[in-house]
Amino acid sequence: MKQNRFIKFLLLPASIGIAFFSINVVKADTNSYRLYNPNSGEHFWTISANEKQSLVNAGWKYESVAWCSVSSGKTLILRVYNPNSGEHFYTTSKTEENSLVHVGWKADGTLSYSSGAIPVYRLYDGKFHFYTTSVAEKNTLAKTKGWHYEGIAFYSIAPEYNWHYDATQSSQSGVAGDVHFPQFDYLTSTEAVTQTYQGNNIFYAYNDAVFNFNAQLQADAKSADYANAQARLNWTNAQNKDSLAVSNAKAALDTATTKKNEAQTLVNQAQADVTADQQNNLDPTQDQALLTQYQTNLTTATAVYNTDNTTYQNAVNTLNTLNKQGTNFVRLSYSVSLSNGGKTVKVNFAKTTRTSGVNNVSGFSRSATLAAG
């Protein structure tokens, strides 16, 4: 690669600001994930699931498992970072790394080692570098898209026949954020990888196992998601019912209050009439009879008022208690563990069911083991 290409690459403006994790520790043989930035057109490769997920969360598109990087060998795959543009470059050449560092790039650890029988081709379009194990993809870019083919960047092996966690999926029909379940990567059918796996059927056996296990996890999530939607709907219906009860009780109480006030007014008037009769030495018999009747009516109206007021207060308390408890729901969370050299996966689910303000937590597990290839 020519020096002026490095300089042009360095001066490109940044597209999306994102903090990348420095990879300084090479782990066991692991898949290299390929991501794409739809805003800048840049591709990025990483063996870190955390780094991959952080980019997906920031708007990058996860495309596939590109290849598998090995954890031992003589030739390191160096990663160099441009702090101005946010771009990364991969090379096995210490000279290339030093040239980039000399013009402002930062050494950013290692991706892994170059080893294996599958070549990783490098292309350049004047702005970005691109890496692929697919001969068809390489030829398409070089022959029809105007990319410059720069040769083999390093070597790799086919993606591991192991379980690979991909990303969290959320609920479908219920409230987003309540139900989560994991999904696992499929092996990509790039030309070299397909040829590698076709001979012993591992490629297809792996993807069948992933499909079936993902389907089981989706079924578990669908069940929890439906229960969550129903729990929330039932709580909302109860809230609507209690709100209606409060409204009806308030209307009845208002009517009772009006009748009690009217009865009290008649009692007050009758008492005034009886007092006037006595002061003027008139016969109070008729007014006293009316007072007695009005007092009986007031007693009845007061009893109705007291009953309706109790009903109203009880309805208000019931609604307040329901609101204080909060909605019912079902939440599903999980943890993933691998064993048997990565061949066996176990997903431990924690299901939280909230009813009447009380959380009940239960658990269940799903596991699967890849058949030996």
Image: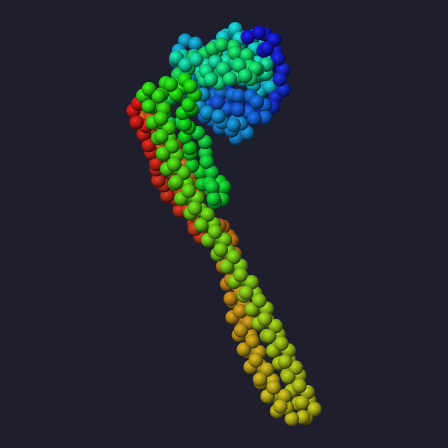
Q: Is residue 14 left or right of residue 72?
A: right
Q: Front-most of 243 and 24? A: 243
Residue located 35% across and 21% down the image: 198
Q: Front-most of 239 and 24? A: 239
Residue located 41% across and 17% down the image: 192
Number of marks: 0
Color theme of the render: rainbow
Considering the image in quadrants, where does the C terminus appear? top left
Give the image quarter of residue 293: bottom right
Give the image quarter of residue 262: bottom right
Q: Residue furthest left?
A: 372
Considering the image in quadrants, where does the N terminus appear? top right
Residue located 62% across and 17% down the image: 12
Q: Residue furthest front?
A: 144
Q: Front-most of 88 and 219? A: 219
| 94 to 25, vertically: above or below | above
Q: Front-most of 23 and 281? A: 23
**Res. 290 visible in picture:** yes
Residue located 49% across and 8% down the image: 93
| 32 to 261, vertically: above or below | above
Q: Residue furthest right?
A: 280
x, y percentage for residue 86?
Answer: 57, 20
**Res. 101 visible in picture:** no
Q: Is residue 44 left or right of residue 84?
A: left
x, y percentage for residue 348?
Answer: 37, 36
x, y percentage for residue 99?
Answer: 56, 8
x, y percentage for residue 314?
Answer: 50, 63
